[in-house]
Image (cartoon, rainbow, N blue to C red):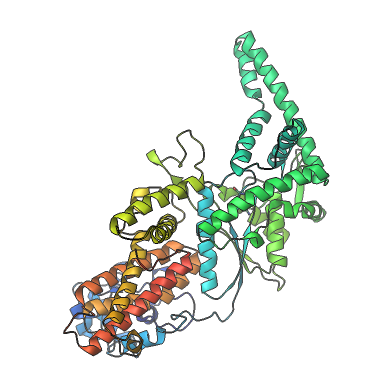
Amino acid sequence: MSTNTTNQPTLDPATALDDRFCAAIRAVVPDLPDDQVKAHIGPSRQPKFGDFQSNCAMPIAKRVGMKPRDLAAKIVEAIDVSGIAQPLTEESIAGPGFINISLLPKALGSALDAMDTDQLGITPPTAPKTIVVDVCGVNLAKQMHVGHLRSTVIGDAIARIQERLGHTVKRQSHVGDWGLPIAMVVEQLCVMEDAGTDLSSVTLAQLNSIYKVVQAKCKAETKALELITKVGGHIKAEIELTERITDANAAMERAKARLVALQSGDDRSVKMWQMIYDITMAACLATCQRLHANITDEHSAGESTYRDELGPLVQDLIDRKIAIEDDGALVVRCEGIKEPTIIRKRDGGFLYATTDLAAIKRRVEKLGGDEVVYCVDSRQGLHFKQVFAAAHKAGYDKTPSGKDAILVHAMFGTVLGEGNKPLKSRSGENLNLTDLLDEAVARASKAVAEKNPDMPESERSAISEAVAMAAIKYADLSTERIKDYVFSFDRMLAFEGDTGPYMLYAIARIKNMLGKADEKGVSVDAAKDASFSLDESAERALALMILRYPTIMHATGTHHEPHRLCGYLYELASLFAKFYEQCPVLKDGVEESTRDGRLRLSMLALRVLQDGCDTLGIPTVDRM
Ligand code: ARG
């Protein structure tokens, strides 16, 4: 299978070679299953033998029972690499069957020339799509925790990547702002107000604790009582527990009554709800902004916005016999999924799944989504499987043009703390995101101060903020999103290695070099028209990596996997570091044409690094 998933012409010689090799393999071994047709093109391990090598012959030969060198000879005979590389011959085959490839002398330079435009080789799609991305999704009266860090940071990056590829993106934050839990908080606030509490300056932190208190208050410990009665516990404990359960049941009844009042638009309830909404969202959106996530008020589409759509939706499912009664509840059964999707409880209440069905309908029908991507915790895997299947069964995923929209759960793993357990505070509660960000900034500030003792305080604080956000975001984005990862300030804030600060440092270093050129009176502008300097192996390796950018961006978008882009940027930054070490640019004695050719290569590398960080939503700095 070819790595070129876009069917667009490519500037990247690696991708072009990949295509040609796959074609040759197919010609030589016509029966080979598609998933075995792999070109295995990589940078040459010994640059003196060429720019690339293909390692395809070994695995395929094994599979079809041939000698690898014989197969390599057949491939070399069949392949057409004209326009990209020097003709391949028997001489190109080495060792057990590696095929060495040297690009045409001018190929590298002209590919770089073609890429050196505003778009950096990423051309607009022939058929742009509308892609809805489910991001953030905080819950009312709760502070953001690390789970929402991921849905915000990865979700925003997924959205930005599609925008960069030229698609229309609509972000939707499915705020948990409706239902019994919120009604409980509303009820409690009413009780507090009745008792004379001034609610005008309530904070989110206070709402968060009220939330916890009322949740506990409404939770009846029926199971405990059953147990005590069964094993014959202490009579006093039994009485106490009975009282607690009576209280809890009463509190639950009040909350349910409040929910009914809220749903029917009761003035006071709605006002109280609005207050909770405003306080939560002000804090949430401020955090999004601080995280450089492009998530604002206009992207909020909370569960409450679907409230009038749920009744008709459920009725529609009943009418078309898609939903059926099951033990008093209403469910949709879908093939291949054991657990039925409950869309109405026995007591008549709607569920999380009901709202998500309405959301799919709106996103596809009204917002025009050809694709809906959900950046949500992997622990909601079953939920989305059920909801996607139910939506499909009901036809809610049909676009106006009659096609099925693509529904994707771009799931992410858990952020872990010590002992590989989900990251929690010392008291076992969810770690508050704001505290986490503050601590990262404090630590970054120390590191920046150590490196730049003379930097004025105001500059240092701006840089520390950016370094901290870059560190946290990069750590979150650079691990495969499906995997859990261990949160470590020390590791993510390191200036060396695969970290955010390293990326920022790489960018700052190139900017610094360009500034130095200016000071030396070397015109950076004039170098923009120079021929790239491509004689040294470090230059060629850097150039080849630069040319991979469009391919990587497309693959990142196809799979909604920002870690692919992070990995690429890290490799690019590392190759730049090698180039910078081995190929002097501004040193006296470097020939003018070489100097300008290297300056131009550096500028192109800088633009790719910068564009990559922008596309991931990672803030950068001019110096650090
Ligand atoms: N509010 C949910 C939570 O915190 C996330 C919402 C995800 N999006 C969705 N369409 N269900 O778990």
Quadrant position of the N terminus in the picture: bottom left
Q: Nearer the viewer, residue 497 or 521?
A: 521
| x then y, percent, for residue 363 | 68, 63
- In the shown orientation, is residue 581 left or right of residue 395? left
**Quarter of the figure that contains the C terminus:** bottom left
Q: Residue at x 70, y 18 (%)?
A: 243
**In the visual, does 494 lie left or right of 255?**
left
Q: Closest to the observer: 378 or 600?
A: 600
Foreground: 243 or 59?
243
Answer above or below: position of 425 versus 5.
Answer: above
Residue 336 visible in the shown view? no
Residue lying at the far top in this picture: please name it: 235
Q: Position of residue 99 (x, y in %)?
A: 25, 78
User: Is 210 left, or right, of 598 in this rendering?
Assistant: right
Residue at image coords 74%, 54%:
306
Quarter where residue 506 is shown: bottom left
Q: Position of residue 605 (x, y in %)?
A: 35, 76
The image position of residue 405, as x and y in percent, is 64, 66
Viewer-side residue, 462 vs 145: 462
Asked if 43 appears above or below 487 in the picture, the reply is below
